[in-house]
Each structure stands twice: as C-alpha cells, then as structure tokens.
Amino acid sequence: MTASLWTAIVPAAGRGSRLGYDQPKILYPVAGRTVLEHLTAALDPLCERMVFVVSPSGQTAIERALETHLPGKWETAIQPEPIGMADAVARGVELVNTPHTIVVWGDQAGLRAEAAALCAHVHETAGKAATIPTVLRADPYVHFERNAAGRLTRILQAREGDPMPAQGESDTGLFCFKTEALRHALEALEDGWAIGARTGERNFLPAFAWMDRELGGVLCPGGIMHTGDTIGLNSSADLLLLERWLADAQPERVKATP
C-alpha cells in the first residue's frame, strides 16, 4: 500500500463515563499506553494524515496528546453533539483529500498494525468501493445479512433492537473506502433512512448494504482480523480483555484466526 493515498478518520468524541473516567475515552490508559497511543502506532505508518473527530469538551486534551504523539500529521474535526457515527464520519471526511480513507473506531486499542496494513493493501488491490473485514462470532452485536447471491441486504444491530442470529458475521471496527464512494454513501444517509429505531442516532453501518447495491460491491474478507483487534473499550471487562490481548506474544497474535 501507499501511505500518501490514505487518510485515517478516528471518531473520538466519546467520554470514558462507563469506565469512571471524566476525560475523552481515547485518552484512557490500557496496558501502559493511552488508547490514542495504541491507535496512532497502528495507523501512522499507513496514512498521510489522521483526522480525529472530537467533542468540544475533549478537543484541547486530545490535541495536546496528538501534538506529543503524532506531530505534524493530525487534524481535528468537531462533532458538537453525539448524534451518531454517520455524523462523526461525515465531519471527518470533510478534511480528507486522499483517494482512500480508513475509518477506525476510537476505542480499539488492540488493533494490530499488520492487520490494518493488510486490510488497506487488499482494498487497494481489489478496487471495490469499500473493503470491510469481518469476523464470525457467537451472539453478535452486529450481523451482516445477505441474500442467496451473497450480497449485503441489511445490517442488523442489537443496539437498535433488531432480531439477532445466534452466530453472526460482524464488522471489525475498521473500514476501508474509496473516499468518493464514502462521500456518496454519507450523502445517501442524509435522507434519514438509517436513523436508529431505538437510539435515534444517525447510524453509519446501514450504508454498507447501500454501497454493495449502488456502488459496485463491497468486499468483506475474513481471516485478516482476529477478534482481539475488534475489542471496543466500554467496560472494565473490555479492559481486561484488551490487556490480555496486548500482552500476548506477537508471533501468537499474528497466527491467530477468527
């Protein structure tokens, strides 16, 4: 892959309230480093720049950390209110000038650099509108529903009250896009059809089925990401899982399969 072709968007407007932390969650310490440090270490080699979508209250603290850990390679976009990930990504993409964009949720401290790089390489090679690596898991929080031909038809989300299967195909919190395709998808979401039934938020994930149907296909490779790469930091239980994952020997982590 070619770093000059890529910008990373990291939605990072959330606070660490559920962790008893009164600062932005991306500054929470995990295994001796903040989530921000883990993410920048994984993504910095892959991208020309990184855009962090932050809240007004978290802006100063996050920018101070970025100046220390990612000097000269970052920008921030402000999300005034936490109204959904589609809104967060849309605010970030306004600052993107590269042909490709990689989006990573801002609480995934366990993301491996080699997994992110492989996803980006596969995306460049495949030439699809989007490359969304997936994992199979029991009791999924998200499930990609497909038709008989294997095309995406719907993205089910437990948080929105959708009926979930016992075993599901889930996203990994990392998404690669052609930037123009991402812009088109976000424009389509503005019609309001992806507003969450339970949360009322502007959801981002439903755009993937639209992209598969309207923009020439979405590639969903398995086997690239381990479930450890996908752990979002939302609770003390998640923190324990992340610390165990990050403590694993690197050769074992590279060989791990979903």
Image (spheres, rainbow, N blue to C red):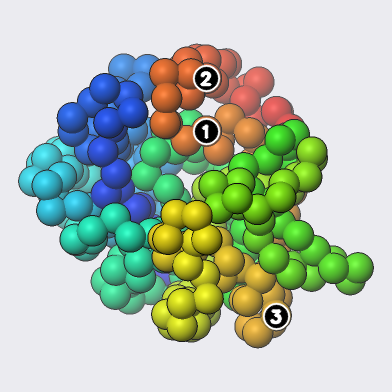
- Tally of numbered discs: 3
Q: Residue at x 79, y 40 (%)?
A: 167
Identify the residue at horizontal 29%, vertical 68% (top origin): 91
The residue lying toward the viewer, choosing from 100 and 9, is 9
Q: Pointers 3 and 1 in contact (CB under 8 A)?
A: no
The label number, if any, that marks residue 101 in the structure image: none
**Which three-letter amino acid code belongs to the residue tagged 3?**
Arg
Nearest to the observer: residue 83 or residue 144: 83
Residue under circle 1? 231
Question: Hey, which quadrant is residue 89 in on the image?
Answer: bottom left
Task: Determine which residue is flagged by label 2.
Answer: 241
Q: Are marks 1 and 2 in contact (CB under 8 Å)?
A: yes
Q: CA distance from mark 3 to mark 2?
A: 36 Å
Callout 3 secondary element: helix
Residue at 60 percent across and 50 percent down: it is: 161
The image position of residue 201, as x and y in percent, is 41, 60
In this rendering, is residue 53 above or below 247?
below
Query: Label 3, label 1: how many angstroms apart (C-alpha)?
Result: 29 Å
